[in-house]
Image: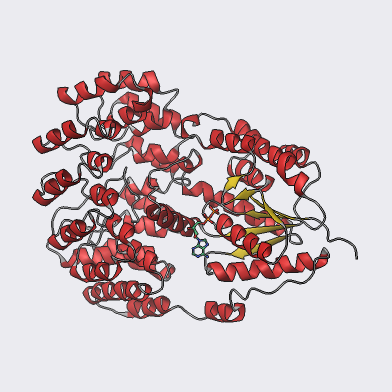
Amino acid sequence: MAEPQPIFIDFEGIDGSGKTTLSNRLAEYLKSQGIPVHHARDQGVFRSKVSRAIRELTRDPSFLGMSDVTEFLLYVARDAQMIDEYIRPKLKPGHVIFSDRYLYSALTQSHHGRGLDRQIVDHVLSMAAGGLWPDLVVYCDVDPLTSRVRKKLQKIREHRLGDFGRKGLMGIGFREQIRKGFLELAEENKGSWIVIDNARSTIEESLQRIFNRVSEVLRLKGYPAILDPHWANLEEAEKHKQTSSPLQVAVEKLLAMGEAKKRQEHSIKIFFDQIRAMVPGRSAYAALFISGFDIMEVHEIREELIEREPALIAHGLRGCVSEPSMNFRARLLEREPLYVAASLSGMAFHPRAIAMREQMAEIAPQQVALALRGNETDSAWVLRERLRKKAPNEVLISLQGIDSEPAWALREKRADKRTAIPALLISLGGIDSDRAWKIRVEHHEEYLPWVLMSLRGLQSDRSWEWRVRFLRCAPKIIVKTLGRSEDPRAWDLRDQAKYYAKEALDSASGIDSGKAWQLRHSLSDKWPNTCVSSLGAGNQSERAWNFRWDQLRKNPENLLLFKHIAKAAVRAQEAPGEEFIDDLDEDESDF
Ligand code: ADP
C-alpha cells in the first residue's frame, strides 16, 4: 500500500480566537491515535529560535515607530524561517504538520489592516512560501469582544495583567479589520478553508467540527481511519443555536414593560438571574461579570464563587468600598495578595484600606506600591519609604501626578537606571512642567509608548502637538490620555481615532454634551456596550435611558451591555452622590 501523503494544516484567526487551544488539543488527540503530528508553534511557542526572536521584535511596544513595510517584512521573515527550518523538513510521507498562523496572518495584518497593496503583498508571500501552502486552513472566527473577554479571563487567572504588545496599542477596531480580511480570504478559498464559529460554540463543539474536516483530509491523503473522539453532539448544538436564549426571551419581556422605574428594577433581576445561572458551569464568567458591583445581592454570589475563582473575585473588588467588600479582601489577602492590593487603589483615606496596605507590604510589595498611585497622604509616604528597596519601580509609578519636591527627589534617584525609565515616565502622568518635559524629550525615541502614556490629562500646547503627531501609531494610548477633556482638540482626536480605539468613547465617559452624544451615535452599531458604558452609570436622564433601551433592543444577547444597564439601574436606586470615576489607565471600562 502507498504511504500516506504529508499534510500541512494551518490555524488562523485574530488574537484570542482559540488557535492555540484548538490546535494543541487536536494535535494531542491525533498523536494519541498514532499519527505523527508536528506542531510548529507548540503551546504557542515557535519551534525556531530565529522566528521567536523576530516575534519579540514585532511585539516590542517600544518599536512603535516601526513602518508598515518593515512590519510586513518581519512577519514574512518569521514565517520564511519557520518554513525552511521546521515545516518543510518535517513534511514527510505519513506526517502531519500543524501551524498556528502562517503567511495569511501577514496578509491580513499588512493588507487588510495597514492597507499595503495586495498585489505586492501577494508577490512577497509567494516568494516566501516557495510553493508551500497548507492543505487545509482552519480559520477560528470570533468577534473581537469575545476574544477580549476570553483573553482577559485567562490573563487574570494567570496573573499576567499588564502585559502589552505593540499590536494591541492599535485598538480593537484594528482587529475587526483583520477579522474582515480573514473572512474575505475564507470566501476566496472555499475549497481549502474551513470557518469555525468559535464564539458561539464550546471548545468541544469547535474541536469536533475541526476533527470532522481533518479526518476527511486524512482519509483523502491515504491515512487509515481514526476513532471519532465524540467531543460533542453537533446536531444538538445546532438545534440549541436556533432557539432563542433565555436572555433574549427575558429581554423581550423587559422591553415590553411600559413603566420606566419598573423596567429598571426588573433589569437588575434579569441580570443577576443570568449570572446565577452561570455560577455552576461558567464560574469564571460569572465572577468576571459581577466585578465592580458593591451590593448585597452580588456579595452573595461572591460568597458562592470565592473558593473556585479567588483571583477573579479579588480582581473584581476594584471600586468597591463597603464593609462586606472589605471582608472579602481580608479573606483573600493571603491567597490573592496581588489583586487584593491592586483593588485598594484609589482608597487613600479608608482606614481599613490603609491598614491592609500596611499588612500586605511584605507579601505583595509591588502591588501595594502601585495602589499608592497619586496618593499624597502621610501614611502613603511612610509606606513608600518602607517599600523603596523592595519595589523601586512601583514606588516610582505611584508618584503619578505628584509634582512635589519629595516626589522629584525620588524620581531623580532612579533617573539614571535604564530599567526604571518606563516607570519614571509613567510617574510623569498629569505633570506638565518643564522638568517633566525635559525627561519626555530625552526618552521619547527609545520609550515612546510610556512617554505617550505620560501625556495623561495634560493641556499644554505641546502635549496636544505630541498627541497629534503620534496618533496614527498608537491611537489607543493617545485617546486614553484625553481624560474627560472637552477641548475642541480632544474632540478632533477622538474623531480620528474612533474607528480603531473604542477608548475614544471611554474618554468621553460621563460627558453629556452634544459632541459626546454624536460620538456615541456614530459608534453605537460598532461598540454598543462601550457606548452605553460611556454614558456613565450616574446619568439618569430620560435621554440616557432611552439610549440604553435602544441598544439593548438591538443587542438582546450582549451580556456586557446588560451589565452596564444593570449598573445604571442599581445607581438609580441609590441616593444621588458622586460618580465613581474608573481609573482609565488601570482597567478597561467593561470590567
Ligand atoms: P489564540 O491562540 O487564538 O490567541 P487561545 O487559544 O489562547 O487563542 O484562546 C484564548 C482563550 O480563549 C483561552 O483562555 C481559551 O481557553 C479560550 N477559549 C478558546 N475557545 C473557547 C471557546 N469555544 N469557549 C470558551 N473559551 C474558549
Nearer to the camera, 257 or 38: 38
Q: Residue at x 17, y 45 (%)?
A: 357
Which residue is at 24% across, 35% downward? 398
In the image, taking residue 534 as reference, residue 168 lies left or right, namely right
Q: Quadrant of the N terminus?
A: bottom right
Would residue 442 be found to the left or right of residue 473 on screen? Answer: left
User: Residue 23 at what x, y percent from top left?
Assistant: 62, 58
Spot occupied by residue 14 in the image (x, y as percentages of width and height):
56, 52
Above or below — where is 108 with respect to 542?
above
The image quadrant that residue 22 belongs to is bottom right
Among the 4 quarters of the image, the one containing residue 252: bottom left
Tell me which residue sits at (52%, 46%) in the image: 174
Residue 506: x %, y % from top left: 34, 48
Q: Is residue 524 above or below residue 550?
A: above
**Looking at the image, which residue is at 33% across and 63% down?**
309
Q: Which color scheme does this rendered protein use?
A: secondary structure
Answer yes or no: is residue 510 visible. Answer: no
Looking at the image, residue 145 sits to the left or right of residue 364; the answer is right
Observer-nearest of 79 and 256: 79
Which residue extends farthest right?
A: 1
- Seen in the picture, residue 29 relative to 498 is either above or below; the reply is below
Can residue 409 be seen in the rendering of this structure? yes
From the top left corner, tell me how far across and down residue 537 is, in percent. 25, 59
Could you tell me which quadrant the C terminus lies in? bottom left
Numbered label tally: 0
